[in-house]
Image (cartoon, helix red, strand yellow):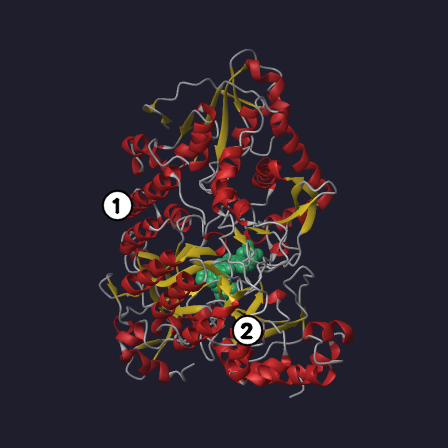
């Protein structure tokens, strides 16, 4: 894992002091709320319905057990005993007091964490594949790239007041688990014909009120050219992105309005200009620093194990619950005898992504004992133990059961993504958590959920789409209609490398109608699928929307 | 066309704690909705907002929120968003105003709840 | 309308600003009023006759000026570069990193954010990337 150098340490501490000073000036009146707001947002501090919310970055989703324990400590000491893991690999505390934020940020700095640029119109916390460094299908670990981008983008003097927020995601696998096509910039690591490492650069994706799938602006960008190229994209965006309308200010609108060809021409011209500069581009990464970063992400010393674990096989034979959990919640690891464990923060009737202090500590213990001291946060709002010996899976499962974290539902219909919605969020038009809770109870029966198979439901409490509803197999968008919460359903979305934006199924419905409608939809799918392995999304693609719309509105 | 004025109170968030506060009749701030100053006319609304404007050092984002009055003349919110602000998260009834001040639930019940 | 520099507030004694469309007309040492949507390449041929370029900041949240300044410097402009308008003290170091020499603010802002705050702003945290870079150059 990356360790801060003196510059990181100094900077993060200095930022805490600066934040305290900014807050003091806000209280003294030197800063107006309008001026203070972007400054606090760039330090992760929002004002929600009932309190301040602090959004802490988990850079590219990776954290150590010690860091997880600090997250738990913060929840206990300064918040209400829980935190909310988000789709952007952050954790949010919903009950922070302005007067405590400086102390919280110092506690984070103690373990090399921060809340810098988790909000505001700047380059946000960079996200990456949560299976990075562990996945069997990986070409290259995306985290050194993500860390380099974090360093380059942190307090970038030119790009702190962009037209709008700017999100970057990196994946090192052909199977895209980082939703790269729904980001302002998505980077996919690949190799050219000669085996040289580089990136496919995707630009202009995004969700929100105008969902757009990102377009390829550069097929192959040599690895060393990354920062000048990003700088070029950002400069073009900063100068030409719309500032007259906040809803049209994202780069996706600029790409859409100028067209990808013209956009490419502008970016390439800006890139060329930098490459021609005397002494080379200002932002070219120092190779020594790149080497230093890469060394931190060298794989841990995996034991030399047989692929098959007799201990696990024996345990599974006598414990069907364990076997079910292993089947859904573990993924193929690149090292023999290891698995990647997905801990679903999706207990029946619980708020998706909410973890208590005790659960965070239990996860920290497991990470330390069984996963080379590493944990990950996924955009599905789950926690990952990336490197677990298959021999240890029974023990891990037992510990998760104790912590009430053993839901065997990763990737299943109850592995729901939901944003905070109107229970917390000041922008919400309707609640999302209660809808998720209702659905998780309806499909709680493990055999039924298992029979339904891979099925993603994603819920947002307003058009901003923080819950990714556009790219859920079933998306649920909470709106307001004549003073009542009303939910619009979209069908056929996909967040993977075959990304698709869901299609609106028809008129909205009340909260009480959503659950029964989804049950009818699922029944219609089970009846129509060609075999047990055909996922909902495949059946949907084969048959089209009609039968499913009919089922939704059959009542 | 301007929207017809509805009976309103001034709601905001406390600068330091971040929780919901209401302007009282003295131009100060209270955490109890029952103590909120009520504006019956646009002029009264403007007066209250005028009092809130220079109080940046105490509150954030003051705005007029529509209310109705119960039989005892106490205000209760008409829009569901405002109801949440007077209570706290519906999914965590142990948190927010509803936890500290269960008295708040009454007028909500009077409005038919959520 | 004080001008903020690294040493504090100084009065404005710059010559009258020339509009971009009149740039070819003026003589030596002119002060250019640079619109935010102008192409810096158009100005580049005139750099040797320009003593001051003023870039407007209609709002502190509008960061176009930072990129424009950066572009002008990259094209070789070595005269004085001034940000004019709504810039807050917290942005002063950003402005300096992007190539501005000074910032002009109105009297109301100067009252609310007086000279000592601007002087203190000089010492705000330096972005770690730039620090690291500086070290790499020395090494
Ligand atoms: C609670 C306070 C929150 C506020 C005020 C907020 C605000 C917003 C806004 C305004 C947008 C739309 C941006 C645009 O289209 O230009 C947005 C998008 C988004 N937010 Fe949030 N959000 C919040 C919480 C969250 C949470 C909890 C998550 C993760 C679970 C999240 C992740 C996202 C994502 C993934 C998008 C859409 C992707 C994109 O196009 O950027 N946000 N948010
Ligand atoms: S989608 Fe809307 S309601 Fe949900 S967190 Fe985002 S802004 Fe809030």
**Residue A242: percent from left, percent from top:** 59, 45
Residue A298 visible in this rendered orientation of the protein: yes
- Please state the horizontal and vertical placement of residue A81, each as a whole percent of the image: 32, 68
Image side of residue A546 versus residue A301, left or right:
right
Q: Residue at x 37, y 47 (%)?
A: A36
Whether residue C70 is situated above or below residue A394 in the rendered picture:
above
Residue located beneath label 2 in the image: A310
Chain that bears disc 2? A
Element class at badge 2: helix
Which quadrant of the figure contains the C terminus of chain A?
Answer: bottom right
Q: Does residue A70 lie above or below A254 as drawn?
A: below
C-beta proximity under 8 Å, tags 1 and 2? no
Q: What residue sits 43% from the left and 24% below the top?
A: C101
Could you classify mark 2 by the number of other residues whose Cα lies within 10 Å: few (under 14), some (14-19), or many (20 or more)? few
Q: How crowded is mark 1: few (under 14 residues within 10 Å), some or many (20 or more)?
A: few
The answer to whether residue C29 is left or right of residue B21 is right
**Distance of mark 1 from mark 2, alpha carbons?**
67 Å
Task: Depth check: give the residue in front, A459 or A348.
Answer: A348
User: Mark 1 sits on what residue?
Assistant: A28
């Amino acid at each position: 894992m990356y360790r801060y150098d003196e510059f990181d340490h100094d900077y993060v501490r200095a930022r805490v002091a600066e934040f305290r000073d900014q807050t003091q000036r806000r209280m003294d009146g030197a800063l107006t709320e309008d001026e203070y707001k972007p400054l606090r947002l760039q330090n992760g501090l929002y004002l929600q319905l009932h309190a301040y919310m602090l959004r802490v970055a988990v850079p590219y989703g990776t954290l150590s057990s010690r860091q997880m324990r600090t997250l738990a400590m913060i929840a206990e000491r300064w918040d209400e005993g829980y935190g909310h893991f988000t789709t952007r690999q952050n954790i949010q505390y919903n009950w922070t007091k302005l007067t405590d934020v400086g102390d919280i940020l110092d506690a984070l700095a103690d373990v090399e964490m921060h809340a810098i640029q988790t909000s505001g119109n700047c380059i946000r916390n960079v996200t990456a594949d949560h299976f990075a460094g562990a996945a069997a299908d990986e070409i290259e670990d995306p985290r050194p790239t993500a860390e380099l981008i974090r360093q380059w983008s942190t307090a970038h003097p030119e790009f702190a007041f962009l037209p709008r927020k700017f999100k970057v995601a990196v994946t090192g696998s052909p199977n895209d688990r980082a939703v790269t096509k729904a980001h302002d910039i998505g980077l996919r690591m690949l190799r050219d014909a000669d085996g040289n490492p580089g990136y496919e650069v995707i630009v202009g994706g995004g969700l929100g009120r105008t969902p757009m799938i990102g377009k390829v602006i550069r097929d192959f960008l040599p690895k060393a050219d990354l920062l000048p190229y990003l700088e070029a994209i950002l400069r073009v965006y900063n100068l030409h992105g719309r500032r007259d309308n906040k809803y049209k200010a994202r780069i996706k609108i600029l790409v859409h309005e100028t067209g990808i060809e013209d956009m490419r021409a502008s970016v390439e011209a800006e890139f060329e200009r930098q490459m021609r500069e005397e002494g080379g581009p200002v932002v070219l990464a120092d190779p020594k620093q790149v080497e230093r970063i890469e060394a931190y992400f060298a794989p841990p010393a995996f034991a030399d194990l047989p692929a098959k674990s007799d201990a696990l096989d024996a345990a599974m034979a006598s414990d069907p619950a364990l076997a079910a959990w292993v089947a859904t919640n573990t993924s193929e690891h690149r090292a023999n005898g290891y698995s990647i464990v997905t801990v679903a923060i999706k207990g029946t009737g619980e708020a998706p992504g909410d973890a208590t202090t005790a659960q965070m500590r239990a996860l920290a213990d497991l990470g330390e004992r069984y996963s080379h001291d590493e944990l990950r946060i996924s955009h599905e709002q789950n926690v990952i133990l990336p490197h677990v010996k298959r021999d240890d899976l029974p023990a891990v499962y037992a510990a998760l059961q104790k912590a009430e974290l053993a839901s065997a539902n990763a990737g299943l219909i109850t592995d729901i993504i939901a944003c905070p919605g109107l229970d917390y969020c000041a922008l919400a038009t309707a609640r999302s958590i209660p809808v998720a809770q209702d659905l998780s109870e309806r499909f709680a029966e493990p055999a039924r959920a298992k029979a339904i198979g891979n099925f993603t439901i994603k819920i947002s409490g307003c058009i901003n789409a923080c819950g990714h509803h556009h790219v859920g197999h079933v998306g649920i968008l909470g709106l307001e209609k004549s003073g009542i919460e009303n939910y619009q359903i979209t069908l056929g979305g996909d967040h993977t490398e075959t990304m698709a934006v869901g299609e609106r199924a028809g008129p909205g419905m009340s909260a009480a109608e959503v659950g029964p409608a989804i049950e009818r939809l699922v029944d219609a799918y089970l009846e129509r699928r060609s075999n047990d392995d055909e996922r909902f999304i495949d059946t949907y693609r084969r048959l089209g929307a009609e039968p499913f719309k009919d089922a939704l509105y059959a009542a | 066309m301007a929207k017809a004025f509805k009976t309103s109170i001034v709601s905001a968030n406390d600068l330091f704690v971040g929780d919901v506060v209401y302007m009282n009749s003295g131009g100060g701030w209270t955490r109890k909705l029952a103590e909120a100053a009520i504006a019956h006319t646009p002029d009264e609304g403007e007066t209250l907002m005028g009092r809130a404007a220079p109080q940046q050092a105490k509150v954030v984002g003051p705005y007029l929120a529509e209310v109705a009055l119960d039989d005892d003349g106490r205000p209760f919110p008409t829009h569901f968003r405002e109801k949440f602000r007077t209570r706290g998260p519906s999914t965590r009834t142990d948190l927010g105003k509803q936890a500290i001040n269960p008295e708040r639930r009454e007028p909500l019940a009077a409005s038919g709840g959520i | 309308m004080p001008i903020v520099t690294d040493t504090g507030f100084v009065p404005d004694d710059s010559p009258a600003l020339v509009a971009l469309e009149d740039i070819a007309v003026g003589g030596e040492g002119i002060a250019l009023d640079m619109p935010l949507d102008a192409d810096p390449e158009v100005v580049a041929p005139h750099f040797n006759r320009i003593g001051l370029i003023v870039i407007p900041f209609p709002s502190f949240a509008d960061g176009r000026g930072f990129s424009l300044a950066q572009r002008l410097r990259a094209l070789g402009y070595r005269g004085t570069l001034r940000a004019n308008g709504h810039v807050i003290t917290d942005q002063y170091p950003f402005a300096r990193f992007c190539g501005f020499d000074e910032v002009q603010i109105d009297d109301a802002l100067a009252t609310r954010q007086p000279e000592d705050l601007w002087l203190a702003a000089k010492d705000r945290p330096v972005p770690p990337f730039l620090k690291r870079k500086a070290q790499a150059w020395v090494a």
